[in-house]
């Protein structure tokens, strides 16, 4: 639809006869050229061209019909069941390709045909839709106000104060049930963002195989992706497992003692150069184990945050601004690696009430 | 040419040019994309003397005459000490062409192998004689046919995929370093890489990933290498990146082309 200022244009050119009057209107310095004259199309002039366009459109619609039938045929011709039961992935690919090409082609051809029809053959003249002012006229506005006043007067809302006040009181109390119901939705999240299933004495086990690790298992330069042993005790269903996988995942690396700086207060957090850090990036929580053995850099693949594991997991590059939380390690009576406690710093992305 | 230039103001001209350019670049990429292979045969001969001669000629300028390593006065390491790196490290580094090193850079690339397998075995035997270290695995230890593909896939996704990509296509690390693609790598070299941790790669020694598990990982990698692409074209097999690029350029490009055609002046 074209919105035009043709009516104003006619004011300029016909009614505003002289230069002086035109200047008083203070319109655009460059006049609105209006809609261009649209020349007749080839199909308007040449009957043979019109018939050709007609055949093209009809051809597309006809081909669409053929493709629709081909879809039905393809559905039968390409079975997806495997001989040994279930679904054959290779056959599904062929079936999907055939079904998609036929049905997609049919829809596309109907659409292209309709547009071709409109562009070549349908009557083509330009229509101007005028835009009206949004403001109602003064009469309507006055009438609306008068109606409102009559209504207010007849309801007696201003006069009968008892009714008015009791209604306001009733409305004020109405939100209370909502507050009660919302408060009853469940316990507040509490420490869920700060705590993980790591705890004093929980064994560090290899991820997937869940076998415990002795310090001697790890050479200098090794990397082990690990989980807390208690992770296996979590219920199979429900949010506990995925939540803890997102929070309690850790990795172990072994460096030469003396190759890395030990922060004050963390002197006994490593076992013979084996350190344990959270696997969750402190930027937005991507899992990271892109460990470069020669530089001790840990790179996050999402936004290239880099942590220096030889320097207490300090963030040295990228958007993360908090060091990777370190898990204090110890060895139990049987010689396996255990956690001294839960993480001291919260794992994963920073949050508002982190330091409260 | 006149036929083409006469149509240069055609409403579809921009879309056609875009499409042709995309086809051209895609074709060029497919033609020039690096294809790699390494054909080395297994052998177990130990010729320490032969190895010593080869080492003195080819390796000692950086690693020192006795493999003790060399560094400049300012501490720049010319070549690290090879004491205790074992035969597996030599077989991997020389067998994939990473050694002898080319020009210095962020990372030594895989390139054409410079020694025959007999020479590599001799070098490996000589370096292994410095101090005990990881040994070259036997043929059975790296046979993909004996591995468990499903278990290997699980281990690969847990321990390796973060750098090498879920389908072993490799990926970028920091400061120009990268995890190389694993397609076309010999099973033996995969095993040795896990065992010795070349360059930036961490070590996965036999007590953290057992020899059986290493074989499972190799079986998985060889399996996905042979697996067909169910969608037809692999477009790099790096998942959402290339697929998204395709969707944005070709998919949205053709939508824009259609919109231009819809709004074009009737003729």
Image (tube, coloured by chain):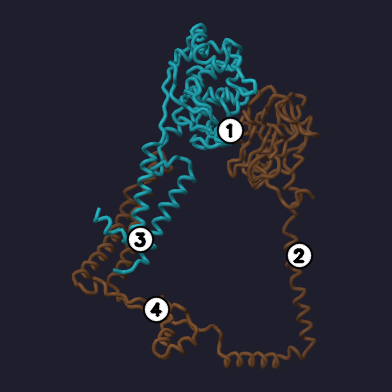
Chain colours: A brown, B cyan
Kindly indicate whether the residue at mark 3 contacts the one at mark 4 (C-beta within 8 angstroms): no
Task: Give a yes or no on whether discs 1 and 2 share a subunit.
Answer: no
- Residue A57 visible, this angle: yes
Q: CA distance from mark 2 to mark 3?
A: 53 Å
Residue linked to disc 1:
B159
Residue linked to disc 2:
A180
Q: Nearer the viewer, residue A7 or A202?
A: A7
Q: Secondary structure under badge 1?
A: helix
Task: Give a yes or no on whether discs 1 and 4 share a subunit.
Answer: no
B70 relative to A106 in the view: left or right: right
Residue B253 position (above or below residue A336): below
Chain of the residue that carries numbered disc 1 in the rendered image: B
Q: What residue appears at the point 45 percent right and 40 percent down from the top-left corner? A: B237
Q: Secondary structure under badge 3?
A: helix
Kindly indicate whether the residue at mark 2 contacts the one at mark 1 (C-beta within 8 angstroms): no
Q: Secondary structure under badge 4?
A: loop
Residue A12 position (above or below residue A321): below
Residue linked to disc 3:
A107
Q: What residue appears at the point 24 percent right and 68 percent down from the top-left corner? A: A54
Image quadrant where one finds the N terminus of chain A: bottom left
Disc number placed over residue A34 in the picture, else none: 4
């Amino acid at each position: 639809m074209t919105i035009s200022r043709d009516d104003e244009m006619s004011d300029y050119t016909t009614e505003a006869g002289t230069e002086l009057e035109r200047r008083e209107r203070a319109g655009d310095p460059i006049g609105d050229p209006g809609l261009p004259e649209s020349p007749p199309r080839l199909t308007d002039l040449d009957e043979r061209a019109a018939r050709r366009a007609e055949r093209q459109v009809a051809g597309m619609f006809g081909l669409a019909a053929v493709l629709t039938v081909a879809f039905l045929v393809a559905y039968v011709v390409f079975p997806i069941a495997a001989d040994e039961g279930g679904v054959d992935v290779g056959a599904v690919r062929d079936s999907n390709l055939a079904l998609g090409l036929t049905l997609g082609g049919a829809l596309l051809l109907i659409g292209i045909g309709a547009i071709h029809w409109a562009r070549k053959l349908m009557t083509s003249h330009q229509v101007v839709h005028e835009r009206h002012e949004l403001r109602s006229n003064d009469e309507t506005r006055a009438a609306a106000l008068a109606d409102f006043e009559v209504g207010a007067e007849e309801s007696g809302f201003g006069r009968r104060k008892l009714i008015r006040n009791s209604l306001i009181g009733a409305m004020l109390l109405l939100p209370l049930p909502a507050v009660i119901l919302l408060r009853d939705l469940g316990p507040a999240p509490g420490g869920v963002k700060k705590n993980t299933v790591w705890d004093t004495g929980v064994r560090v086990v290899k991820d997937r195989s869940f076998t415990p690790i002795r310090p001697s298992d790890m050479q200098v330069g090794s990397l082990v992706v690990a989980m807390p042993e208690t992770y296996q005790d979590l219920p199979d269903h429900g949010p506990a497992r995925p939540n803890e996988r997102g929070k309690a995942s850790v990795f172990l690396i072994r460096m030469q003692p003396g190759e890395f700086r030990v922060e004050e207060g963390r002197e006994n957090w490593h076992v013979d150069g084996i350190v344990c850090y959270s696997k969750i990036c402190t930027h937005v929580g991507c899992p990271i184990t892109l460990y470069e053995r020669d530089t001790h850099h840990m790179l996050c693949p999402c936004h290239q945050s880099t942590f220096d594991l030889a320097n207490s997991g300090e963030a040295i590059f990228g958007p993360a601004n908090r060091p990777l939380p370190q898990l204090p390690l110890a060895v139990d009576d049987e010689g396996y690696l255990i956690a001294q406690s839960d993480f001291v710093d919260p794992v994963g992305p920073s949050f508002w009430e982190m330091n409260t | 040419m006149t036929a083409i230039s006469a149509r240069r103001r055609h409403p579809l001209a921009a879309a056609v040019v875009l499409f042709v350019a995309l086809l051209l670049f895609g074709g060029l990429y497919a033609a020039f994309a690096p294809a790699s292979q390494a054909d080395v045969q297994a052998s177990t001969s130990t010729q320490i003397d032969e190895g010593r001669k080869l080492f003195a000629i080819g390796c000692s300028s950086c690693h020192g005459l006795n493999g003790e390593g060399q560094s400049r006065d300012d501490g720049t390491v010319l070549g690290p000490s090879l004491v205790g790196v074992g035969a597996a490290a030599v077989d991997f580094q020389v067998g994939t062409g990473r050694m002898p090193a080319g020009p210095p850079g962020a990372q030594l690339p895989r390139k054409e192998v410079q020694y025959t397998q007999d020479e590599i075995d001799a070098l490996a035997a000589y370096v292994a004689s410095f101090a005990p270290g990881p040994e070259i695995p036997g043929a059975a230890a790296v046979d993909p046919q004996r591995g468990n593909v499903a278990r290997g896939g699980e281990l690969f996704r847990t321990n390796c995929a973060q750098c090498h990509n879920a389908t072993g296509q490799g990926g970028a690390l920091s400061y120009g370093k990268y995890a190389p693609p694993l397609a076309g790598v010999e099973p033996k070299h995969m095993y040795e890489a896990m065992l010795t941790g070349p360059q930036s790669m961490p070590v996965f020694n036999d007590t953290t990933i057992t020899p059986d598990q290493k074989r499972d990982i190799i079986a998985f990698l060889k399996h996905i290498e042979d697996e067909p692409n169910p969608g037809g074209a692999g477009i790099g097999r790096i998942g959402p990146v290339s697929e998204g690029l395709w969707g944005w350029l070709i998919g949205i490009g053709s939508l824009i082309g259609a919109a231009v055609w819809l709004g074009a002046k009737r003729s």
